[in-house]
Structure formats: structure tokens, C-alpha cells
Image (cartoon, helix red, strand yellow):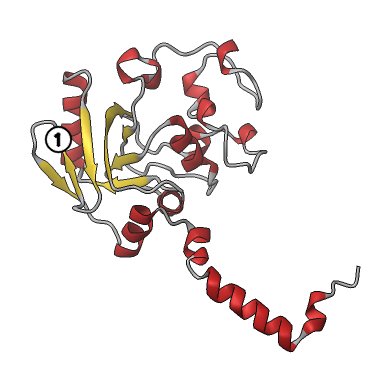
Amino acid sequence: MDAFTLHTGLVAPMDRANVDTDAIIPKQFLKSIARSGFGPNLFDEWRYLDPGEPGQDPASRKPNPDFVLNQPRYQGASVLLARQNFGCGSSREHAPWALQQYGFRTILAPSFADIFFNNCFKNGLLPIVLSEAQMDRLFDEVAAFPGYQLTIDLPRQVVVKPDGSELPFEVAPFRKYCLINGFDDIGLTLRHQDKIKAFEAERLAKMPWLAHTGL
């Protein structure tokens, strides 16, 4: 997965509490496990006025002009502001896939659903918990200033605002290590591939019959 160290991006506000994973990526799009192509269907039922189906050309859809991500001022946003309990509902890993493939690198909220929170880290998406007062201020500033950007400095664990002020945040050391180095679960295992190969070679030398499948 892509490493995360320092990111500066346009901010989009999702001013709704309890946004569940079915709203993030509706169930009809869960048929694929290819881990690609989910971005066009992020928030599909809110983003479009017509129902969507897998494989449908987004250009043929009717966008909802009132939905925040369809507004011109938020095009290209890579930082998402959210409210309490973001990512609740089912445990579908497609939710962080869709957010990331749309272009988001980080989500700021007062709280996240536990499984969604864990899935974000496993897929290179950084969820940041800030206080409700801090989030209220950010929502106000985004509304007041078109083109509002934030910088996320993961090594220093701070959110840097346009005026230079900083909002510190907590992140578990192991999760921070994985994000900075771009390690998902497979990447962590592959750090030891030389030892794995040596073990397999030694095992086959001692038990050569394991190399035969019987087919």
C-alpha cells in the first residue's frame, strides 16, 4: 500500500453523524474483491439521483447537485471531515477501499466505528480522532474559506491548519510504523521472505515427499 508521511490536501465536509458503511459503498457493489474501481460509487445513493449498478458508466448517471462532493469547490478533496461514529454498520473492507480510490488519504472525526477504524489502517487510509470542539471549528473554517486545506504530518502527529496552528492527534506506534513504511499485512510478512524461503528449503530437504501433491 502507499506510504503515508506528510499530506496536504483540500478538505471536504461530511456533516452527518453515524455514516454507515452501506452509505459509504452500497451493498450491490460488494460483488468484486479486486480492490479496485470502487471510487466512482463512493456514497453512491447520496451522490447520484438515479440508482447505480456495478459496471455502470458514471458519466451516464445523474449527479445530485446538492451533495457535498459534487459541489465544484470540493472537487479533488483528499481530506474528509466527518462527525461521530463514522463507518458504523457492517464490517465491509470495501468502505475504506472506496474512500481511498476516490482520492481521500485521511478522515478526521470525533469517533469512528471500531472495525472501520482498523480497516482504514490496513489499507493506507489514516483516521484521525479530534475533539468535537476541534471538529466544529474545522467545519466552520471549511465553510467560510473556499479552497481550505490541511496538512497532516504523521511523523509529528499533528494536523497543521492554514494559519500554522497545530492540532495534535494520537496514533498507535505500530500503526504509525506501518503507515509510514507502506506496510499492509502482506508487506509485513514479506519483510521476512528470506527466512521464509530458507525455512521452506530446509523443510523440503528433510521431508521431500511434501513437494508431491499426488495430482
Which quadrant of the structure image shows residue 125?
Answer: top left
- At 54% from the left and 72% from the top, the residue drawn is 194
The residue under label 1 is 161
Q: Is residue 123 above or below residue 42?
A: below
Give residue 42's position: percent from left, percent from top. 49, 29
Q: Secondary structure at mark 1?
A: loop
Is residue 111 visible in the rendered image? The answer is no
Of residues 140 and 179, the one drawn nearer to the viewer in this rendering: 179
Relative side of 61 to 96, left or right: right
Q: Is residue 33 above or below residue 51?
A: below
Relative side of 187 to 86, left or right: right
Relative side of 163 to 131, left or right: left
- At 28% from the left and 31% from the top, the residue drawn is 9
Which quadrant of the structure image shows residue 132?
Answer: top left
Q: Amino acid at mark 1?
A: Lys
Q: Quadrant of the C terminus?
A: bottom right
Is residue 69 visible in the rendered image? The answer is yes
- At 61% from the left and 17% from the top, the residue drawn is 57
Give residue 178's position: percent from left, percent from top. 38, 58
Of residues 5 and 64, the one drawn nearer to the viewer in this rendering: 5
